[in-house]
Image (cartoon, rainbow, N blue to C red):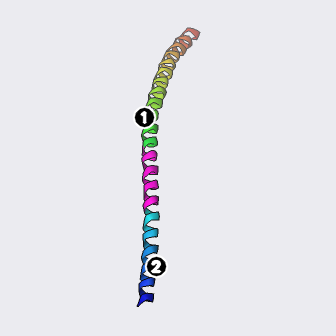
Amino acid sequence: MSILLFIIGYFLKMQITVIEELTVSVNILSRTVAVLENKTENSMLNCDIKHNTIDSRLKRHGERLDVNEKEIAILKEKVK
């Protein structure tokens, strides 16, 4: 009978140890997920800023191309 209690006690102790390790692992993973979510949000904010910068540059380049196209057309007319 005491051997049976010893075996049960041993396995309960092992179970408690495993549960404690799992709790620590889950806590670490939860913190990691929180950090990654924060980094993702920051990256998305930075992307919006970069996209706005790129869009404004593309708009300016488009405007310059329009001006150049008109000037080229005028020069072609003068050459004829």
Q: Residue at x 54, y 15 (%)?
A: 72
Mark with earlier residue (1, 2): 2
Q: Which residue is mark 1?
A: 45
Q: Amino acid under label 2?
A: Tyr
Nearer to us in this view, 26 or 37: 26
Q: Which residues are magenta?
A: 23-37
Q: State the image coordinates of residue 22 (x, y, percent, origin top left).
A: 44, 64
Q: Is residue 30 above or below residue 3?
A: above
Q: Residue at x 45, y 88 (%)?
A: 3
Nearer to us in this view, 34 or 22: 22
Closer mark to the observer between disc 1 and disc 2: 2
Q: Is 15 included in the stretch rendered in magenta?
A: no
Nearer to us in this view, 14 or 66: 14
Task: Measure how far apart labels 1 and 2 are at the Cα level.
Answer: 53 Å
- Image side of residue 15 versus residue 75, left or right: left
Q: Which residue is mark 2?
A: 10
Q: Is 29 included in the stretch rendered in magenta?
A: yes
Point out which mark residue 19 bears: none
Q: Amino acid under label 1?
A: Leu
Callout 2: SS: helix
Nearer to us in this view, 59 or 34: 34
* Dominant SS in magenta: helix
Q: State the image coordinates of residue 45 (x, y, percent, origin top left).
A: 42, 34
